[in-house]
Amino acid sequence: MSRPATTETTMDDDAAASRRLLEEATKGAAKLKPSSVKDASSKPVTAKKSTPVAKAQLKTAAKKKGTKEDKIGGVGQGGVDAFDLGKIASLAKKEKDKGKDRSSGAGEFDEQALDEAAGKTIDEEEDGMGSGEEADDGWESDLNDVDGILKRKVVNDPYITACKVLGVVPVSYFAERINTNEIILKHRGLGPKGAQAIASVLEFNNSISHLNLSDNWIESGGAHIGRSLQINRTLTFLNLSNNKLSLQGGAEIAEMLGFNGTLKTLILKGNALGDKEASLLAEGLRQNSCLQVLDLSYNQIGDLGAIALGAGLSSNDSIKDLSLAWNQIRVRGATGFLSNLKDNSHISVLSLQDNGIGENGIAVSSFLAKSNSIVSLNIGRIRMNDASMVLLSKGIEQNYSIKELDISENPVGDVGMLALFKSVLASNCIKRVVMRHIKVTKEARVKLEELKSEKADLEIVE
């Protein structure tokens, strides 16, 4: 259906006027663009696909700026979207009424053309912004390089890396002291995995010589510590007390003794070590020629374990200080242990405190009579009676090395104490006798005072 000529002419004139104003508006918008955007758009732009979210944000920002500039009569940076199409048509009509010549255009008012023009302007601005983003890519690359450096630093730190792999929180105290000589890390609740992380450091560490990991419940983690010390050649002191090592951890620690050539002190007290673990330790001691101090107190070693340890120590020439206090050794075990130990000429400090071996005074006496290396002997609370003390006193008379004897808290009467005082008086080497919580009668007290007066250099501790 054809339209009336007057209406068609009016629409054509309006459309032509709108197009011309649109062109002027677009040119004005280009002039009002900030210099930073213009400079950015003049640079070569790397093809970059805008995401829908980024495009929407740019359009919103452009509309806001365009609205602000419209208030002062300018053209918004957002392009033609900031214009009111109704105002454009109104201006076109006013110009027609003034009688100005208008160039006629074909077709009716084309809103789609305006949208396309507006879209083109916005795309140009996006391209300009894209140049700025492209310029920032260099900074992003630098940040990535820094991150890479930090990652390489972590990789070079075996402790932090091991903690990440094992899923445990690093102990900052340990991490900060990896390159020091001594680390005391007690009561930290490391657990098996925490001990494994530390073991990864010990394998190749050349600084730590003194390490105390007592009371951390590392349990099976002791196996990793043991394996790492097969390689380590720096550590000389290791305290693993109260860590519930049992068989899993104790077995690897025992095997380590056959390979390690630098460790001098090993403290394993309070680890629930039994006869089997003691037998494994004995095998390690046969091959070891470096360890000097071994503390196996507060464990569960019985007669079989004690006999095995004695056999292992008979061929060991490095152990000087051994503690088997607070175990489960009885008469049979003490006899076998001390019988084998007679052939050892290097042990100078021995503690058998709190083991039920008191009735077997003959074994202790025989050991003292044949040992020329023992300097300090602790046999406190071993249930020693008068008969056992008399036998012990005979061994003291035949010994030429012992300097300190501890017989505290044994149920000994006057007979046993008088025999002891006599042997101490005859000895030329004993300098200190510890006899706490032993009842001394008046008759025995007289002999004790005589002993003190005759041997002024003798120390009696009651």
Image (cartoon, rainbow, N blue to C red):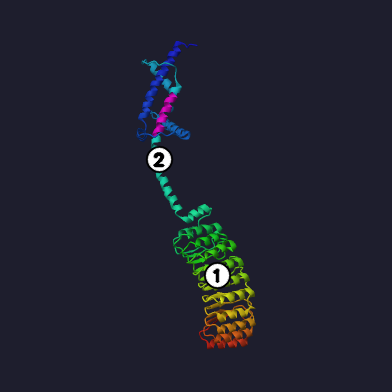
Give x and y (percent) for residue 409.
61, 77
Q: What range of the chain is rendered magenta?
A: 114-128
Horizontally, residue 363 falls left or right of residue 4, namely right
Query: Which of the pair 254/361 is nearer the observer?
Result: 254
Q: Name the residue type under label 2.
A: Asp
The disc placed on residue 295 is 1
Question: For residue 115: magenta?
Answer: yes
Q: Residue at x 42, y 45 (%)?
A: 144
Q: Which amino acid type corresponds to the residue marked 1 in the rendered image?
A: Asp
Along the line of sight, which residue is nearer the eye, 106 or 247? 247
Name the one closer to the observer, 104 or 206: 206
Q: Residue 137 carries which label?
A: 2
The answer to whether any part of residue 80 appears in the image is no
Which of the marked residues, 2 or 1, is nearer the chain's N terminus? Answer: 2
Where's residue 420, x and y in %?
A: 59, 84
Number of residues whose C-alpha sits closer than 10 Å to that of mark 2, classed few (under 14), some (14–19) or many (20 or more)? few
Residue 176 image position (x, y, % from top left): 46, 59
